Amino acid sequence: MAKQFTPDMLIFDALELHEGAAGVFESFGLPCRRCAVAEVETVEEGARSKGIDPKEILSRLNALYEKRKVSSPGKEHLPEDKN
Protein backbone atom coordinates (compact mmCIF):
# COMPACT_ATOMS: atom_id res chain seq x y z
CA MET A 1 0.00 0.00 0.00
CA ALA A 2 1.34 3.43 -0.95
CA LYS A 3 2.08 5.91 1.77
CA GLN A 4 -0.56 8.58 2.03
CA PHE A 5 -1.40 11.55 4.21
CA THR A 6 -4.93 11.56 5.64
CA PRO A 7 -7.12 14.21 7.32
CA ASP A 8 -7.18 12.30 10.63
CA MET A 9 -3.39 11.88 10.77
CA LEU A 10 -1.66 13.75 13.57
CA ILE A 11 0.50 16.58 12.27
CA PHE A 12 3.44 15.07 14.16
CA ASP A 13 2.97 11.78 12.28
CA ALA A 14 2.73 13.64 8.96
CA LEU A 15 6.03 15.36 9.70
CA GLU A 16 7.61 11.98 10.42
CA LEU A 17 6.15 10.36 7.29
CA HIS A 18 8.02 12.55 4.77
CA GLU A 19 10.83 15.05 5.19
CA GLY A 20 9.10 17.45 2.78
CA ALA A 21 5.94 17.70 4.90
CA ALA A 22 7.28 20.53 7.06
CA GLY A 23 7.81 22.69 3.98
CA VAL A 24 4.26 22.04 2.81
CA PHE A 25 2.81 23.06 6.17
CA GLU A 26 5.03 26.15 6.27
CA SER A 27 3.91 27.16 2.77
CA PHE A 28 0.37 27.41 4.20
CA GLY A 29 1.55 29.48 7.17
CA LEU A 30 1.60 26.55 9.60
CA PRO A 31 4.96 26.35 11.43
CA CYS A 32 4.18 22.82 12.60
CA ARG A 33 7.75 21.80 13.40
CA ARG A 34 7.81 24.35 16.17
CA CYS A 35 4.23 23.93 17.37
CA ALA A 36 3.42 22.02 20.56
CA VAL A 37 -0.06 21.02 19.34
CA ALA A 38 1.42 19.03 16.42
CA GLU A 39 1.41 15.99 18.71
CA VAL A 40 -2.34 16.21 19.40
CA GLU A 41 -3.83 18.03 16.40
CA THR A 42 -4.74 16.35 13.11
CA VAL A 43 -3.92 17.66 9.67
CA GLU A 44 -7.58 18.57 9.21
CA GLU A 45 -7.81 20.37 12.57
CA GLY A 46 -4.61 22.30 11.90
CA ALA A 47 -5.83 23.40 8.50
CA ARG A 48 -9.26 24.45 9.73
CA SER A 49 -7.73 26.37 12.65
CA LYS A 50 -6.11 28.67 10.05
CA GLY A 51 -9.14 28.82 7.74
CA ILE A 52 -7.54 26.55 5.14
CA ASP A 53 -9.37 23.82 3.24
CA PRO A 54 -7.77 20.56 4.46
CA LYS A 55 -8.05 19.12 0.93
CA GLU A 56 -5.58 21.75 -0.31
CA ILE A 57 -2.93 20.77 2.23
CA LEU A 58 -3.55 17.05 1.72
CA SER A 59 -3.23 17.42 -2.03
CA ARG A 60 0.17 19.09 -1.65
CA LEU A 61 1.29 16.59 0.99
CA ASN A 62 0.31 13.59 -1.10
CA ALA A 63 2.03 15.14 -4.13
CA LEU A 64 5.28 14.53 -2.25
CA TYR A 65 4.92 10.88 -3.23
CA GLU A 66 4.28 11.53 -6.93
CA LYS A 67 7.11 11.36 -9.42
CA ARG A 68 9.29 14.40 -9.18
CA LYS A 69 12.39 15.78 -10.81
CA VAL A 70 15.63 15.87 -8.88
CA SER A 71 17.88 18.78 -9.79
CA SER A 72 20.64 17.96 -7.32
CA PRO A 73 21.18 15.40 -4.56
CA GLY A 74 18.77 15.98 -1.71
CA LYS A 75 16.82 18.65 -3.56
CA GLU A 76 13.40 17.35 -4.55
CA HIS A 77 10.83 19.39 -6.46
CA LEU A 78 7.13 18.90 -6.80
CA PRO A 79 5.87 18.25 -10.32
CA GLU A 80 5.31 21.39 -12.33
CA ASP A 81 1.71 22.41 -12.97
CA LYS A 82 1.05 21.86 -16.67
CA ASN A 83 -2.22 23.85 -16.84
Image (tube, rainbow, N blue to C red):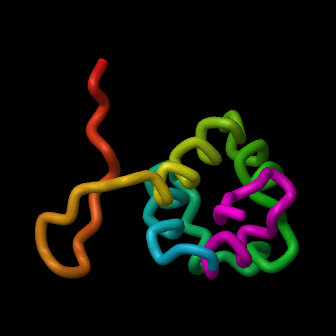
What residue lies at 57% left-to-right and 78% top-to-bottom?
A: 33
Instruction: Give the vertical position of 67 relative to 82 (above or below).
Output: below
In this view, the residue in front, 21 or 38, is 21
Q: Quadrant of residue 10?
A: bottom right
In this view, the residue in front, 59 or 70, is 70
Asked whether, in this view, residue 41 is left or right of residue 67, the answer is right
Quarter of the figure with the C terminus: top left
In this view, the residue in front, 5 or 39, is 5
Instruction: Give the vertical position of 30 relative to 60 (above or below).
Output: below
Q: Quadrant of residue 41?
A: bottom right
Quarter of the figure with the N terminus: bottom right
The segment highlighted magenta reads 1-16
Q: Would residue 8 be counted in the magenta stretch?
A: yes
Q: How far from the left and from the top, in percent, is residue 73?
A: 18, 80
Asked whether, in this view, residue 40 is left or right of residue 22, the answer is right
Q: Would residue 33 be counted in the magenta stretch?
A: no
How many numbered tags mark residues here?
A: 0
Q: How far from the left and from the top, in percent, is residue 82?
A: 27, 25
What residue lies at 28% left-to-right and 66% top-to-bottom?
A: 76
Asked whether, in this view, residue 25 is left or right of residue 3, the answer is left
Magenta stretch: helix, strand or loop mostly: loop
What residue lies at 71% left-to-right and 77% top-to-bottom?
A: 12
Instruction: Give the vertical position of 60 relative to 21 (above or below).
Output: above
In this view, the residue in front, 48 or 6, is 6
Q: How far from the left and from the top, in percent, is residue 63?
A: 49, 49
Residue furthest front as drawn:
1
